[in-house]
Image (tube, coloured by chain):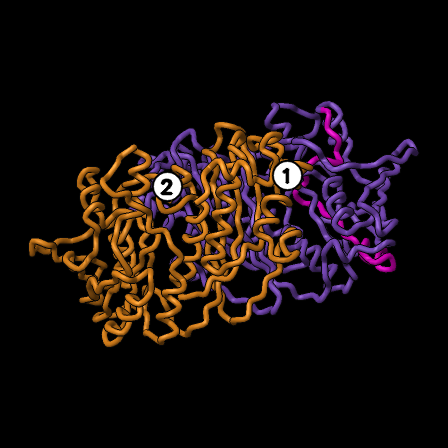
Chain colours: A orange, B purple
Amino acid sequence: METPEDFTISCPIPIAQYPHVLLAHGGGGKLMHQLIETMFLATFSSGDRNRHDAAEIDLKSSRTAFTTDSYVVQPLFFPGGDIGSLAVNGTVNDLAMCGARPLYLSVGFILEEGLSMATLWRVVRSIQQAATAANVQIVTGDTKVVDKGKADGIFINTAGIGAIEHSFAIAPPSVKPGDVLLLNGDLGRHGIAIMAVREGLEFESQIESDSAPLASLVLQLLEAKIEIHCLRDLTRGGLSSALNEIAQAAGVTIAIDENCIPIREDVQGACEILGFDPLYVANEGRFVAFVAPSEAPRALQIMRSHSLGASAQIIGNVTESNSSGFVTMNSKIGTQRIVDMLSGEQLPRIC
Amino acid sequence: METPEDFTISCPIPIAQYPHVLLAHGGGGKLMHQLIETMFLATFSSGDRNRHDAAEIDLKSSRTAFTTDSYVVQPLFFPGGDIGSLAVNGTVNDLAMCGARPLYLSVGFILEEGLSMATLWRVVRSIQQAATAANVQIVTGDTKVVDKGKADGIFINTAGIGAIEHSFAIAPPSVKPGDVLLLNGDLGRHGIAIMAVREGLEFESQIESDSAPLASLVLQLLEAKIEIHCLRDLTRGGLSSALNEIAQAAGVTIAIDENCIPIREDVQGACEILGFDPLYVANEGRFVAFVAPSEAPRALQIMRSHSLGASAQIIGNVTESNSSGFVTMNSKIGTQRIVDMLSGEQLPRIC
């Protein structure tokens, strides 16, 4: 594992000369070109296609998915990830939630004047490693620098393009009564990992973010012809906001069972200390799949055989259509309650 | 023309209740959904495709262009444009510089807590109007809110996808000795318009940004089968940085003639007062086209018959290949000089 000091040594921009990002690194002149050529293109480059205003990409499928997300997470580095890997995984996951195969990413940096050059390099390296792991190519980018005090170190936008190779309509309107909900793993780790660093909390075991690229797991389900009706990753607002959104968009009632929702004991404990409900805490490697009931056992088996679904569970089902969109939960103590959408802000700058 | 007050009245979010953007508007809960549904989707929506994690788009051509830019311009509103129209035109122009027909845009907002809701609405409306004018659809987006003091009002990222319908290789390696350079209009207005507002300067006539979508002009050249070798828009770093980049990438010498470069008198005067060289000042609606010499008269005629090329000029040609990449200029007083790439930062946060 490289230490922060290693990035000072390996940085392709001479740190002695440029220890920090300057406004001129975004000014369109020589310094910007040096940064783009030696750091970004040399790291991300796949041939010559990055060198122009736009990249030319190959799309073989007839159906294409397109998405974007900006990343403003604070701190930039946290157990289990950093803003760079998050910016790749988050956008890859948005494509995966359409059942698309992620192919190409753009990366737009907004840097604060005075950002440590070694920090930028560490983030750039993390982006490239995450892109390799997720099997996507970074083909185009942009860099802006704003004056000190007008941003917060580094903000990243990624946009992603993916190929839709299946013939399902994976979206809320496809959700039907009887559909079974599968969850690919335990909840709450990303939010708690961020919060622990931010608040200086220490737990017995370190809680790491679950940040991961979900496309290969989703593509395995699709290759096995599992009849998927809807997919949703459980980021800002957590499981409860995602399910409420789908329930409302589909006009259905969703019933989940608290006993079936995997939450690690240390995460549960941290949530109790911090006053959070884990159903609302952000995840970056978790999703729910709505599948036809007859397909649920096979889907669960496929999920569990994948490293990102080893602790997958069936957590509920769709009970009613023509509903105004509710989520109900059978609690551990046997009562039933409505699980509402997050109303305010639980954890700012979680992604 | 609507006044800022009109946007307070027409804003789809009730200003009395939410005069400013709150952290919760980016938190994944009810307020974020209200903002997305009533402001963004209602304004940008083209059918239902924006409602999921990613949008599905139709791409009919076999060749596709993909690009991204972040926009951090300060002030947000300036004569001739604003950050919203700039974020559309800038990305549309990057696609146009590949000779691509711009089709789809993503829009990612990073908002500072406390931003006036009416200001956000004014920017959103401007984005939609610019998208309509440029004939592109906004199909996917994202909103993040960061704490007050950690950004500067509003930053926007757009990524764009376009269809390449021609069969040319429009890129620096296609540039050849003899190629003629055409410029579609006068230089320096965007940079000076921004600077005038920022510094509180008043000139006899108001200098407006040249911000404009260039795709329809480029597509007219392509439809007329003009043999285009390279295109470049003259943003950060201006004409001189763009030509130096191409000269270096293509390994050629480019000679331009100062007498042929249109610069308005008021812009020239403002540059003299501010100590700027207009060759380095950013434009947002200007580009150079490198065309085969036999095609130059016809290309000039097509440019001049388009509203964005009315004052187009032939400004120079490519004189040598196997060069290490120089740009020379015959000056107005008859001398010849090297025009170098911008070395530092001329105008921060120009786009």
SS of the residue at dot 2? Answer: strand
Left or right: where A95 falls relative to B160: left
State the mark number for residue A89: none
Question: Neighbour class for label 1 at 10 Å: few (<14), some, many (≥20)?
Answer: many
The residue depicted at 51 percent of the width and 28 percent of the height is A148
Percent across and percent down for residue A16 are 60, 30
Residue at x 61%, y 24% (from the top left corner): B199
Element class at badge 1: helix
Of the two numbered discs 2 and 1 on the same chain, state the one appearing first in sequence: 1
Q: Residue at x 40, y 47 (%)?
A: B39
- Rendering coords of residue B203 (x, y %): 69, 25
Q: Which residue is mark 2?
A: A78
Q: Which stretch appears magenta?
A: B275-300
- How far apart marks 2 and 1 lie (CA) works out to 29 Å
Residue tagged by mark 1? A32
Chain under numbered label 2: A
Left or right: where A84 falls relative to B19? right
